[in-house]
Image (cartoon, rainbow, N blue to C red):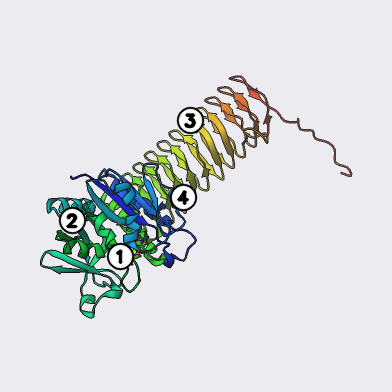
Amino acid sequence: MKNFSVVILAAGAGTRMKSSLPKVMHKLSGKPLINWVIDSVQSLKPDNIVVVLGHKSEIVEENLDKKIKAVYQKEQLGSAHALMQAAKVLKNYKGDVLVMCGDVPLVKTSALSSLLKYNAKNKASATVLAAKVEDPFGYGRIVKSGAALEKIVEEKDASPQEKLINEINSGIYCFDNNIWKALLKVKPDNAKKEYYLTDTIEILKKSGKKTLSLTAENASGLKGINNRFELHEAEMALQELKISELFEKGVTVIDANNTYISYDAQIGRDTVIYPGTFIDAGVKIGRNCVIKGTSYIKNSVLADNVSILYSYVDGADIGKGSKIGPFSHIRPGSVLKDNVKVGNFSETKKAVISKNSKVNHLSYIGDAEIGENVNIGAGTITCNYDGKNKHKTVIGADSFVGSNVNIVAPVNIGKGVLVAAGSTITHDIPSGKLAIARARQEVKQRKGR
Ligand code: UD1
Ligand code: MG
């Protein structure tokens, strides 16, 4: 493929979003719109990605990768004026320039590569990615003569005849480097008094250059997002796509309308997802798992045969056959090995819990390392924080911690230890010992009885 660079126009305020956040920072499936657009083109390995920023540029910029070059359009005078701001970076660049808007998150990489190839193969100065739609209202219309593209006419400037054209400009273009000269000739002589990028087509054409349009096979990915409803529609379209893809892979989703699964989730076959589940970004789930109840899972890896019931799981690594919940809170840094059980109202944080160990009821296990086959009794708490620092608890394999034990960290409990219920452990316990740390019970006579 011919070398190319990308310019993403994202200086507009996105007034119709009615938001204090710039439009391109609104999230679709947890990822800002502009990042969707950037990701759609990254695998084609452009030489440069230039983003034109304006409205609240600092908010957009701090979310961008360092490799992306930002240029600024102080006043939003139109899309041609926006592209002109990228001239300082690309004026002497010899390859083609792919121009996109920051609000078309679902554009397919394949549509972009087809556009780039088409422009290069036909040695055109400009190719516009077009789409045939049922309702062209609001879009720029594609005016052709034969195969050649004559011009693009905006809705507000179109004649009644032109308004009938149902082939529209997607706002995605491939230009050769004649674009920079053509931009200088654009005048704001139109209904909106803006410098329209679309006018460069007629300008290039009149100076004897070849201008073409390529009609996309699938128009759905080319929809721009301008308001909250369109954002919602895109979210729904993405969910439908993701869940269909999971069906193809052998995953059961009982109620697709009441399940939310992030675009990047990886889920193995024969896993069953029950209604009410929210799988956020960064989740990998193995085979034969069951996710049930209003569970929320984020940034976590679940091996095969794991079950999660009514639980909140974030930043965890959960081994084969482990069972979580109901009502567990598994926090970042929890590493639960195979066949671990964390039950009702138990919380784990930065804790390694080894094979076959159980934290079944009402416990807090934080900053801890727990060996294999350990039983943690109901209500056991690792007292990991002294008000200034966090301290670690280590419990060796095959130990049994009775109910309602406080373990005041830092503390090391050996292997095969028995800790009596109700103990407050403040000192290390060697392997194989029994520790009781509670006042001995006294039974006294009750007055008057
Ligand atoms: C534009 C096209 C229209 C096309 C439609 C597709 C023009 C004149 N028209 O119309 O043919 O059918 O997109 O969605 O381009 N921008 C800036 N600075 C500005 C103005 C705009 O950065 O001064 C950016 C916006 O942030 C946006 C893009 O350019 O990402 C398009 O601008 P917008 O005003 O939304 O144009 P449309 O009316 O949608
Ligand atoms: Mg628009």
**First in residue order: circle 1 vs circle 2:** 2
**First in residue order: circle 3 vs circle 4:** 4
> Which dot, 3 or 4, sits closer to the camera?
4
- Residue picked out by circle 1: 196
**First in residue order: circle 3 vs circle 1:** 1
Q: Is residue 355 above or below residue 175?
A: above
The residue lying furthest to the left in this view is 146
Q: Quadrant of the N terminus?
A: top left
Regarding residue 424, the answer to whether it shows in the image is: yes
Q: Is residue 434 above or below residue 449?
A: above
Of residues 103 and 379, the one nearer the viewer is 103
**First in residue order: circle 4 vs circle 2:** 2
How far apart are the two marked residues, 1 and 2, measured between alpha carbons? Answer: 17 Å
- Residue picked out by circle 4: 296
Label 3: few (<14), some or many (≥20) within 10 Å? many
> Which dot, 4 or 2, sits closer to the camera?
2
Q: Residue at x 24, y 62 (%)?
A: 200
Q: Residue at x 33, y 61 (%)?
A: 79
Regarding residue 221, the answer to whether it shows in the image is: no
Task: Locate residue 58 relative to residue 38 in the image: left or right.
Answer: right
Q: CB of residue at label 1: within 8 Å of ligand 1?
A: yes
- Give, as a three-letter code, the residue at label 2: Ser
How far apart are the two marked residues, 4 and 2, measured between alpha carbons? Answer: 50 Å
Residue 434 locus on image (x, y percent): 64, 23
How far apart are the two marked residues, 1 and 4, measured between alpha carbons? Answer: 46 Å
Q: Secondary structure at mark 1?
A: loop
Task: Locate residue 398 relative to residue 318 in the image: left or right.
Answer: right
Q: Secondary structure at mark 3?
A: loop
